[in-house]
Amino acid sequence: MRTMDDIIVAASAAGRSRLAVAAAQETSVLEAVADAYEAGIACPILVGDPEAIMRAALECREGRGLDIGKFEVVPDTDPISSVSKAVGLVRSGEADFLMKGIVDTSILLRVVLNKEMGIGTGKLASHVAVMQTARYHKLFIITDAAINIAPDLPASRCWRRWKK
């Protein structure tokens, strides 16, 4: 795969995954999940304040609005609690992936990595970002810019095994 379009084609061929969005009441988040839905990649579950989600949806697409009627909404007006609910959806198998909405990363990670209620496996957690630029012919994959800022050699070897 050399482009983001290649990734989107492969992901849509695999079918929709259920995506739990914690604190979903933000326009760019809603636009991203709508794009993923339209591409056949994700079936969003929006966790957050229903009124705020609706207001944000109306502001999407430069004020043209976004129809979120096909998306499930799990009501929760507290951002921390909405993260817990979204993580719970992944933990229970009701969702396949978790997406961060309008909530601090530290709050999200605190819930995700919680030993009793989170979705950690007890193994090394990692962050991976994929980027495309017109100035280079391949995708860039950046890892551990947010969680493991200084991985040791065993952690680096773990990632090498994962990418195979």
Image: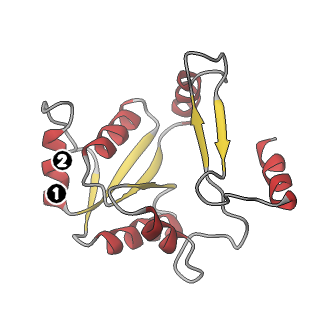
At label 1, counting other C-alpha atoms closer than 10 Å, the crowd grade (few under 14, some 14-19, many 20 or more) is: some
Residue 19 image offset from top left, x and y in percent: 43, 51
Q: Is residue 44 above or below residue 138?
A: below
Residue projecting furthest to the front: 150
Q: Give the side of residue 149 with respect to residue 110, left or right.
A: right
User: Residue at 55% of width from left, 78% of height from top?
Assistant: 114
Residue 8 image offset from top left, x and y in percent: 52, 28
Amino acid type of the residue tagged 1 in the rendering: Ala
The quadrant of the picture occupied by the N terminus is: top right
Q: Which residue is mark 2?
A: 56
Q: Give the side of residue 31 with respect to residue 1, left or right.
A: left
Secondary structure found at label 1 = helix
How far apart are labels 2 and 1 at the CA level? 6 Å
Q: Is residue 5 above or below residue 128?
A: above
Secondary structure found at label 2 = helix
At label 2, counting other C-alpha atoms closer than 10 Å, the crowd grade (few under 14, some 14-19, many 20 or more) is: many
Q: Give the side of residue 41 with respect to residue 158, left or right.
A: left
Quarter-of-image position of residue 14: top right
Residue 54 image offset from top left, x and y in percent: 15, 51
User: Residue at 52% of width from left, 64% of height from top?
Assistant: 93
Q: Give the side of residue 102 with respect to residue 137, left or right.
A: left
Residue projecting furthest to the bottom: 116
Residue 6 image offset from top left, x and y in percent: 58, 23
In this orientation, which residue lies closer to the viewer: 83 or 151?
A: 151
The quadrant of the picture occupied by the C terminus is: top right
**Total numbered labels:** 2
Q: Which mark is residue 52?
A: 1
- Say whether marks 2 and 1 touch (CB < 8 Å): yes
